[in-house]
Amino acid sequence: MKREHLLAIPIDWKNEPHASVSYEIMMEASELHLISGVEYNFQCVSGLGNDSGWQNSPIYIDTNLQPETEYSYTVQARSISNPGHVSPPSLPYKVQTQAANSVDEIMEQLELIPLVYNGNKNNRINIVVMNRWVENDAEPYNRPEMKDEFLVDVENSVVKALTLGDPDAVTPYANYSAFYNIYALWWPNIPVWDPKRPECLGWKQVQEIRNRLFLPWRDEYTGWVTLLSMLNTTGGGGGAGRELLSRVGDAYIVGNEIASMMHEFAHTATGIADEYTSSGKWGHGSETYNTTNFYQRNQVKWRAWITPETPVPTPYTDEYLGVVGLFEGGQHRLSDHFRPTARGCLMGAGAFGVQHLCPICVQRTILKHYDLVNPIERITPTQTEMQIEGETSIHFQVIHLKPEPNTLETEWRLNGKVIAVNVNQVEITLGSTDHYQLTFSLADKTKRIRPDPPYAAYPLHQVSWIIKNSNPTHDSLPLEIELEATNPSFLGHDGQIQSQVSGGTPPYEYIWSNGSQDPFLSDLSAGTYELRVIDQHFDYATTSYQLKQKSKLDIDLRSVWTKNGWKVDLNSESDEKLNCWWSTGAMTSTVDGLKDGIYQYKVSNTDGVELESEIRLLKPEVSLQAVSEIIPATAGQMDGAVWLNIHGGREPYSVTWADPRLFSDEIVLYQAEEAQYLGPISGRDEGCYGKEMGCLKFEGQAGWIDWQITVPLTGRYPLTFRYKTGDRVTALLLINGNDIGKHLEFPKSGDWQDYQQEVDLQGGKNSIRLQAENQSTLSLDYLSVPQKAWFEKPDEWVRTSLSSGTYTVLIKDANHTAIEKTVQIPEANRFLLENVNLEKAHTNKIRIANPNPDYYYYWYDADFSIHHIDQTIKPIAQGTGFEPERSGNYYLSCQRISDGAISQNRVGFAVTKGDRLPLCSNHVSKTELEPDQLSA
Ligand SMILES: [Zn+2]
């Protein structure tokens, strides 16, 4: 290729036009290397800026500009020896100058020194280390002669941490160093830093400096900058904050040690939370990637890393010190919050000073690299849509970033068929068919990721070219697919799909959405299956089939003793018509005049679903009876309960409540900060010190959040929003773009609370969009969605989590004799158990010194702490006194005798058994509104 061909296409920016001050815009073109020499021309195409004219330097600074004004520039190159040979202009790039304020002068004094430069800041995670000092520093970084020492200190901390092979390298950062740029930001005469004196370079100014240097980003999703303020001390400690929407973070580090620097950095770009439990407590304790409030194995986001032999929650015993489990404690909390390892993470699990991350933080870090940086940097041809006429050979190439060691697997697919793997260029002859899609995909299949969507999946990036051919050279009958299927039986996984392909040119390649490559699929559950068939000439056809589960036959069998003997009735619960057969020879749904004995029956519905069983009849001594006990529901909440006491008739009994409940299983959490959202939103508290890793806060109206979720089957599912709001918030819920015709009303709640809404979802991907409607703010922690949901009539004797209202239950005994009972759950006002004074009654007993005559007291074990939502936990004692068996933590709650309401809180207290020590101390209230107060 002749060099001058480089001028056939527009040249790229090395650094797009950028303004860090109010009066100047700097820009840099990618350098061209022509034998004949090259010149550049930068033109201001909108706004009253200045053109550069033809010049040798690829850098241009346009100056004397107006503050906060928009300008656009293009760049062109030409050959010096052949000035008529000019490249087309690049697309105009728009940029706005900064506001004219005191930061302009600071920018003049700053020097941004690239220490590790791997590419354009807009597609890198940029770490900037700034020199800072405080009053008592022995050797402050505050004068020009300290520059060399400062640079060496940055080299010895962040640069070493990201240098593979260095003894101080930190994984996985060092393996992915190509995804980073590292800069030192040097201000020779930087003023002292005193957080109490705003004039001493406060956070707002530091953040403005950072933003002026790096914002705005060129692309919608890539690029990140974290500014680390470093002191010339050792000892550790610090703080960090981040803004998700603008993709910036900042931190201060008391000292320049690697572990502290990387710990604070991890809070920013990768959003990893603290795993320690000491050093105070802040934030809201929301869900994060590496800490959780859930203690059920299948709801732990890192469940793929926990072996079946490891108990969940995991005890702090020798056996489990080195494994991934679920250890209580995290995000500064001792209880009700959990982390992945007992010890051994830079984020503070167990002990500080560890210089590596735990496997869960490693996984998260790797995933975030691919979120913030697109590893596909350059493609050839640059245009992704092409037209050809007949047989044509084209060379395709992709330049991409790699981790070290390289764990990427790359693949080239032509119309879906793999044609090459693990190469970054291919030469393809196209022409036989009329339409091609060539896709290059790159997946990081590192062992440090265990796929378990949505918590983890191998990072995947791809690029496609569409090539249309106006003159196909191959002619054959159109490719066609026919599918024949058998639906799975009820709760079965025995569905089948057989495909039949005709036309095209064999051999055919089969690609199913479940990964299979066979023409025939078996052992299938209900769901949608897509098939693509590709022939020898890359001609292809696609089709899909939805397998449905066969229906279940639910029957209602009832008997009644009459003066003529037993009368038995067979009915379908769904009122469908049944065919009946009885061992007495009867073919009717009702049989009469039966004596005690065993009778067989068979029923079938019109779908052909059959059921065969028997009824055993024996006249009881006493007739069937039932009574109920009730706990009222607190106004607006679902905390009512009912207990049934059944006797008489003949055991065993069966219980069926009339209100079908949506049961669910395999809950999946979708964190708010992983969703897409549009402001006004703030991802953190004011200032740099407070940080909240997992939640998003909507600052009033016009904000929305959109989760992309997946469910296996079309059907009705409960969505649960974990939220918090200082005021009642109404919001609009859109499912796949459609308004559900109802405003969600989130009641005021000072702490995290669940809001549930049932919705209809499609099998596969769905968009769940929540749009805040009034001025109040709404904080969202996560959305949870079950993978399995079905309606079932509850069959428990004890029902909890009920709102006030009427409930009907059908009770049957072994004879299928039935009684129907209706219970009313009343509404009660919320109350707290307060001002409890405990005293020692005698050697081994404690009692309430000031019992309330309207209260009935319940005493609970320490285990109660993690199950405090569950009303079915049995108290270990009742009444005003209690005899603890051991030293430890216990809890007390009460029921109001006048209306039956249960206290919203539990009072926790510690018991120390021994002769000289007091029996109890330290009691604190533990309420559902303040779940984190208890550390006794
Ligand atoms: Zn960790």
Image (spheres, rainbow, N blue to C red):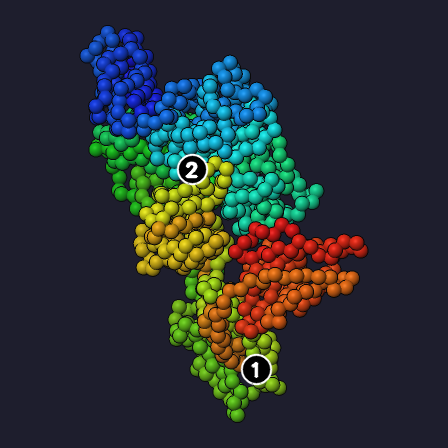
Nearer to us in this view, 929 or 109: 109
Determine which quarter of the picture holds residue 341.
top right
Q: Residue at x 50, y 40 (%)?
A: 690
Quadrant of the snapshot with the N terminus: top left
Q: On the picture, is 721 further left or further right than 476?
A: right
Question: From what the image shows, is residue 103 above or below residue 757?
Answer: above
Question: From what the image shows, is residue 240 above or below residue 54?
Answer: below
Separation of marks 2 and 1 at Cα, in angstroms? 64 Å
Q: Residue at x 32, y 28 (%)?
A: 99
Q: Quick one: label 2 or label 1, which is nearer the N terminus?
A: 2
Q: Secondary structure at mark 2?
A: strand
| Rendered-image quarter of ligand 1 | top right
Q: On the picture, is 315 further left or further right than 305?
A: right
The percent coordinates of residue 246 (x first, y second) are 39, 35
Mark 2, Cα crowd under 10 Å, few <14 / some 14-19 / many 20+, is: some
Tag 2–tag 1 contact (CB < 8 Å) = no
Q: Residue at x 70, y 42 (%)?
A: 318
Camera-near label (2 vs 1) is 2
The label shown at residue 243 is 2
Mark 1, Cα crowd under 10 Å, few <14 / some 14-19 / many 20+, is: some
Nearer to us in this view, 398 or 524: 398
Q: Amino acid at mark 2?
A: Glu
Question: Does the image show residue 439?
Answer: no
Looking at this rendering, what residue extends furthest in the bottom direction?
563
Question: Does the image show residue 331?
Answer: yes
Question: From what the image shows, is residue 141 above or below residue 442?
Answer: above
Looking at this rendering, what residue extends furthest in the right direction?
915
Q: On the picture, is 244 further left or further right than 915?
A: left
Q: Residue at x 37, y 57 (%)?
A: 744
Q: Amino acid at mark 1?
A: Leu
The label shown at residue 624 is 1
